[in-house]
Image (spheres, rainbow, N blue to C red):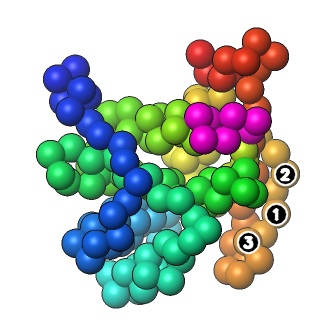
């Protein structure tokens, strides 16, 4: 991404408008498919993902959207009262452009005492991203609803008060 493009990148709380719901559902589906690799099970149609956006993107969650020129490119769902990042997805065509990093930086600002997240063990690319960001790998368990294996990651500020990745 050129510096000028990076400067045009905006992070904002999501509007909840239907067009943004549809855009985030599309990002979620495409990113989930990409994370599964070639061994992906049957992929649910876009209506499934839109239904999840409608059902899950409600208070008390906070949703932050990374966009450029009014086009959503990535999003993050946080539960600040639980110090938890529930979802973070970047459109696969936008990987490597700093979008995920910018969203995690926002999580660090919003939850400065630290936070945690889970990522599917099948999502090697996501695990590498979180490790590069400086998150600490934790225990492996199973998602309480889907039963899929996942690994915990956590972020804590360094003793100097600066994020570990700086």
User: Image height check: is 38 above or below 147?
Assistant: above
Q: Which residues are magenta?
A: 108-114
User: Image height check: is 106 above or below 88?
Assistant: above
Numbered label attached to residue 139: 2
Numbered label attached to residue 141: 1
* Residue 63 location (% of width, % of height): 47, 59
**Pointer 1 and pointer 3: residues touching (CB < 8 Å)?**
yes
Is residue 135 found left or right of 45 in the rendered image?
Answer: right
Query: Looking at the rendering, in which quadrant would you find the N terminus?
Result: top left
Q: Place residue 96 in its image quadrant.
A: top left
Q: Place residue 51 in its image quadrant.
A: bottom left
Q: CA distance from mark 3 to mark 2?
A: 12 Å
Q: Place residue 142 in its image quadrant.
A: bottom right
User: Image height check: is 28 above or below 111?
Assistant: below
Q: Secondary structure at mark 3?
A: loop
Residue under the image location 52 percent in, 74 percent down: 58
Q: Which residue is mark 3?
A: 143
Is residue 88 found left or right of 20 in the rendered image?
Answer: right
Whether residue 32 appears in this view of the structure is yes
Residue under the image location 58 percent in, 65 percent down: 61
């Amino acid at each position: 991404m050129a510096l000028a493009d990076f400067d045009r990148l905006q992070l904002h709380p999501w509007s909840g408008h239907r067009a943004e719901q549809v855009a985030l559902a599309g990002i979620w589906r495409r990113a989930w498919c990409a994370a599964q690799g070639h061994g992906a099970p049957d992929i649910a149609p876009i209506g499934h993902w839109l239904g999840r956006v409608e059902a899950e993107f409600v208070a008390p969650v906070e949703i932050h959207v990374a966009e450029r020129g009014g086009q959503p490119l990535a999003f993050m769902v946080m539960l600040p009262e639980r110090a938890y990042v529930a979802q973070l997805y970047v459109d696969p065509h936008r990987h490597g452009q700093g979008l995920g990093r910018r969203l995690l930086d926002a999580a660090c600002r919003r939850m400065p005492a630290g936070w945690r997240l889970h990522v599917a063990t099948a999502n090697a690319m996501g695990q590498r991203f979180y490790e590069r960001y400086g998150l600490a790998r934790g225990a492996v368990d199973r998602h309480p609803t889907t039963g899929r294996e996942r690994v915990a990651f956590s972020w804590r500020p360094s003793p100097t008060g600066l994020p570990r990745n700086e």
